[in-house]
Amino acid sequence: MRAPIEWLRELTEVDPQAKGVDVAATLVRVGLEEEDILGGDVTGPLVVGRVLERTPEEQKNGKTINWCQVDVGAANGTGEPQGIVCGAHNFDAGDLVAVILPGGVLPGNFEISARKTYGHVSAGMICSAMELGLGEDHDGIIVLTEQLPADVVSGLAPGDDLIPVLGLDSETVEVNVTPDRGYCFSMRGIAREYALSAGTPFVDPADLPVAPASGPGYEVRLSDDAPVDGVPGCDRYVARVVRGIDATASSPEWMQRRLTEVGMRPISLAVDVTNYVMMLLGQPLHAFDLDTLSGAIEVRRARTGETLRTLDDVERTLDPTDLLITDGGTTPLAIAGVMGGETSEVTASTVNVLVEAAHFDPVTVARSARRHRLSTEASKRFERGVDPAVTAAAAQLAVDLLVEHGGGSADTTATDVGEPALPPSIPLDPQLPTRYIGLDYPRDEVIASLTAIGCTVTDDGESLLVAPPTWRPDLVDGPDLVEEVARVRGYDQIPSVVPRASAGRGLTPGQRARRVAARTLAATGLVEVLSYPFTSADRHDAFGYAADDARRETVRLANPLQDEAPLMRTSILDTLLDTLRRNVSRGHRDVALYEIGLVTAGGITPLPLPPGGVKPDEQALARITDGVPVQPRHVAIAAAGAALPAGPHGPARAVEATDVVGWVRALGTSLGLELQVEAAQREPFHPGRCVAVSVPGGAVVGYAGELHPKVVSRLELPERTVAAEIDLDAVVAASGAPVRPSQLSTQPVANTDVALVMDEGVPAAAVAAALRSGAGEDLESLTLFDVYRGDQVGEGRKSLAYRMTFRADRTLKTEEVSSLRDKAVAAATSATGAQQR
């Protein structure tokens, strides 16, 4: 919300010397964060000029320019007329105009200098409204005698400074309004908060006399047969009629300036009046062309199949939950609280206007705005809660402005139907702020602070009963009131105290394990990333999942961030590979990424839908908890390009499946586990370059390897992309208690090698497991150092060579080592059919 300081001065006392930074600091003290300070963009000599001569000169390109002699008084230092080239034609000799001289700066940091153009040296510029940032008009220059009040013009002379006259020295503070402070989407709300912070009086612009109605006005019916959560879509509707206005009349200059300062574009009198009242009071209004209406106004829900062409020239199909303003209950005129329709739009031929001021349900408006992707100034305010008590005053102010500036007369009758519910009173323990904040808030201060923000406080001697003001629908319980008490004294008064962790309250074993895993992968050269956990069924198809694959079963979001990704991911690779592709497409050829995050295992069962505003009972909570799918924590890796860049040592080495397997095993080692790998087939991996990763005991916890070429092609990934995904929770659970270091042995090791021949289909992991089981406890390590396929072992056969390292509590003899080796070979032969070479 933009708050012009000069407008703010009309509603509360602001120090005449206060600048934008001062006003912003005052607002920050009560929780309104500064976004920007606007204004003051025009600097340097911007002065009054009187045109002495205007000589039209036609150019070779067919354009006619004016060579002007302009009296700028003593502003140019010489008192001589200033020669200026101007392309506009809406002025003549004798007119007073706005002239910026060399050295001046226009909005956009555009510095003015004397330069030669069209055969003359133009020493300055005669300015238009657009060039000065005062509006959108660029068709002609500003003629002061036409655009300023006569009493102002009479006091101007050539050379006078125009910056304060045109208000170009005024500043506007832009504040960030949080969703719970919707009343600050108005000058009324901003001024109220400024007065609260500065301790100055506040002039409520809504405190104006509403003309008593001589009788019922235009007929309005409120008919909501499908209220959301039992709350009617419209609980107050005020309608006023103004007849005989001149809709082509221009809005007054002060109103256009105010709208421009708050970031709105002046359009026409009727639209400008409704926008001005909305920005002042926070109450959105709508103006209908009365002569286009044929029946009573009826507020109702949409019917299936109804459509409406809105003011943005879009034909919209309406939903049965949309709240509509209709003509006689049949023809839709507007989506309530969001946008009007074309059929009743005020145009240049409009003579009679019906002004609508209503109070709509925030939930109903929010759903319609999101459904139709229409975020308007009106919907932003209704979504956050509009003061229902200001409705009649807003309509009265709009009627008064239309009559004053558009002529015509207001009907003495008026319509005001519906009765909004008052905010419920809140019981409050006066000691609650002290207990919550940690500072001493005396009872009198609590009452004074709540009264200052507009609450009515009843003190029965023990507890307080607090009735929130109508413009604060966000105040619903005791903690909300505590926040207000703290805010009024000042958030800066609350000390920053870092809590001290007591003994035994550090990281859990699972948290420490996850940190170890992240550090290990980062130390191997991988880069951690985070991706949105949302995917689509198309990704499952691209991965080649079978129709009955359990990984297709997941949760579908009711309101996804992207229509293309409505599903919760069942694998981190669903989203990590997109991040890999994006990095490669940005020029990073060698990329190795990892991500630790949650996945969804299985779909969601039907859950009970308890009523809003009521805590579900224990049985319902249990059903909800049991119905939520399991979400294990996984770690995934994806890499492409070179694992080792080119250098003096030789050419680059492309990343391979063995690299990603090594990263996975390093992860296991860091957690005290020796992860086992065994050849496997699993989508989306290459069937011949994929391994299943298991923990000691045999439980498979993930897969690693090279992605299938078809998957790589479908996802537009680099060739030979490798990946892995591991159930980190399962690995951490298998690691058990933290590993304690054992005492180093001083005994020597004994090494022996063994080569075994077996069928090609026998997994190396099975052979290694058999050797370990047969060798006994004295086997310290087992390393595969050679794989041979060739004529010496025969077709369909392979030879695996292992180095076996033994160590005992004594020096082992040669015959002991040979015996242990033979036992290991015998176990491998029995388990896999392997024969010693």
Image (tube, rainbow, N blue to C red):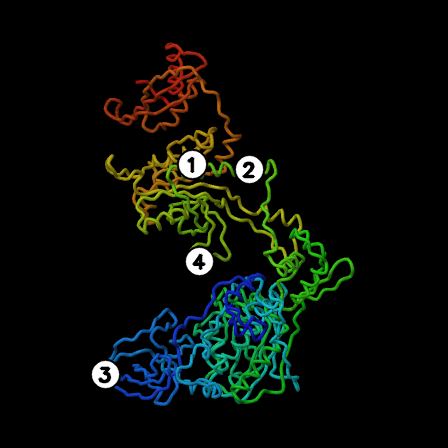
Badge 3 marks a residue whose secondary structure is loop
- The residue where tag 1 is placed is 520
- The residue where tag 4 is placed is 563
- Residue 277 vs 597, above or below: the answer is below
Q: Which amino acid does label 3 sit on?
A: Gln
> x, y percentage for residue 83?
30, 82
- The residue where tag 2 is placed is 508
In this rendering, position of residue 55 left or right of residue 633: left
How far apart are the alpha carbons under marks 1 and 2? 18 Å
Q: Which residue occupies the foreground of this view, 228 or 46?
A: 46
- The residue where tag 3 is placed is 59
Q: What residue type is labelled 4?
A: Asp
Q: Quadrant of residue 239?
A: bottom right
Q: Earlier in the sequence, mark 3 or mark 4?
A: 3
Q: What residue type is labelled 2?
A: Thr
* Label 3 environment density (alpha carbons within 10 Å; few <14, some 14–19, many ≥20): few
